Amino acid sequence: MQFNAIIEPFRVKTVEPIRHTTREQRLAAIRRAGYNPFLLKAEDVLIDLLTDSGTGAMSSRQWAGMMLGDESYAGARSFYKFEAAVKKITGFKHVMPTHQGRAAERILFGSALKPGDIVPNNTHFDTTRANVEYRGAIGLDIPIPEAHQPRVYHPFKGNVDLEKLERALAENPGKIPMVMVTVTNNSGGGQPVSMANIRAVSEIAHSHGAPFFIDACRFAENSWFIKMREEGYADKSPMEIAQEMFSYADGATMSAKKDGLANIGGFLAMNDDELAMKCKNMEILGEGFPTYGGLAGYDLEAIAVGLEEALDPDYLRYRIRSIEYLGERMKEDGIPFIEPTGGHAVYIDARAMLPHIPWNEYPGWALSLALYIEGGIRSAEIGTVMFGRQPDGSEKPADMDLVRMAFPRRMYTQSHVDYLAEVLGYIREISPRIRGVRMVEEPPVLRHFTARFEPAHGEILAEA
Ligand SMILES: *Cc1c(COP(=O)(O)O)cnc(C)c1O
């Protein structure tokens, strides 16, 4: 008998209370925060879906591992455990721990890029793009066309457009020092990349003499999608699939705050001896000695265990299925979102849901405020507030106005997801009454983090 209920493949050993608040309390809190969810106190949030980065719950094995942390400056036992865990999955020869994913990016690009270079990727994550551009190089996003069509189903919407990759390499000889692929494609909706696409990218890059690096933050979730959706992989374990993915690559950058199931950490790994030597020197300048890389010994222990736990089929089934289930409930209620649901998040199409709010009153932002005020849910606008300001000071609508609900790992349960579905259904009912906002204080860069807003028409929710 096949049972349908999703159960969490763990039981609870330590609990952290979350706090119910009244609508009045939430209205007061969001006013104090300048109508910016980033400026809320976390304790005023009931369900926090701001990000899946570093927010997950560690296992008893990870906490036990932390007690074994060897804090020796060089050559600590914990490093060798960490290195063995990374090598088992990736097979790469050189493994450098870093304090986050972006540190791995800074070290890699600082060692391998020069001004005018081009790095193709399905979609650069924002820190990846920023680190490429900081070197005076260009980040070229070339996902398949379906990546931009929210309601079109494609099993691997994170795939790279191979023709565009071939053309970029042919037209820019000597200017592409590496090709990257981000698994899953975070900025493109947490969408997976197929094994066939990874293999093809690797062959194309290598035929032009360019090394191939994987931005591996969600390698375990990507492996699960390959197992579920790609022919020939149903009987392989997520570990075997991950090993095959990395076998096509020459190196990887990783944020252990994602599929490392840790609260902090990351790594840079590669096969090339000469590049690794350069990177190790850069690492010493900015992160620390290459056997601790800005982390405590106990962090290395937590990541070593986390990387393996992230590949547990029961865990991956529960994780991907919970998010898919929320998508199904949203579809029943007529809530538009990027389909199919991704590995770590659901992206609501706020522009489609709130067509009466003009782009310059920020429909995504308004929707995220309504989710907080009505249900205590914190989400993140990925739209015109985040991307609308142009270098010349003008403003234009972003490609899409989305609201991302990103799921911390192993933190919330089925009943939390049912609650989310209920709140979202209610928000759908009252959506014609949701009003836009105007920005009253705007910082010069990365404005979404600290900007302050006011309702453009009295209140966020107009009287019935
Ligand atoms: C989070 C993330 C990074 C950066 O990692 P940090 O640990 O936040 O520095 C890079 N790439 C992708 C795809 C990410 O999701």
Image (cartoon, rainbow, N blue to C red):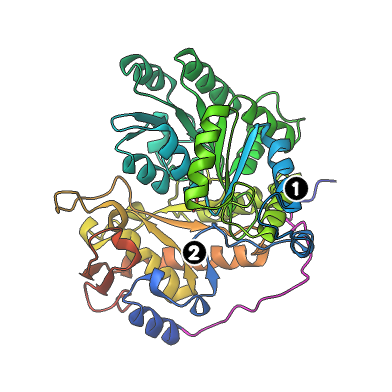
- Disc 2 on helix, strand or loop? helix
Q: Quick one: SS at disc 1? A: helix
Tell me if mark 1 has few (under 14), some (14-19) or many (20+) residues whose alpha carbon lies within 10 angstroms of its own. Answer: some
Q: Is residue 149 above or below residue 58?
A: above
Residue beneath label 1, please?
81
The stretch of residues the image draws in magenta is 4-22
Q: For this rendering, which residue is in front, 462 or 300?
A: 300
Q: CA distance from mark 1 to mark 2?
A: 47 Å
Q: Position of residue 116 (x, y in %)?
A: 28, 30
Residue 364 seen by the camera: yes
- Residue at 37% x, 39% y is 132
> Mark 2 is on which residue type?
Gly
Q: In the rendered image of this protein, does residue 212 appear above or below residue 288?
A: above
Q: Which residue is mark 2?
A: 425
Image point (52%, 57%), residue name: 406
Quarter assignment of residue 452: bottom left
Q: Mark 2 or mark 1, which is nearer the start of the sequence?
A: 1
Residue 291 falls left or right of residue 438: right
Q: In terms of depth relative to the viewer, which is nearer, 173 or 24? A: 173
Q: Type of residue at label 1?
A: Lys
Q: Position of residue 65 (x, y in %)?
A: 77, 59
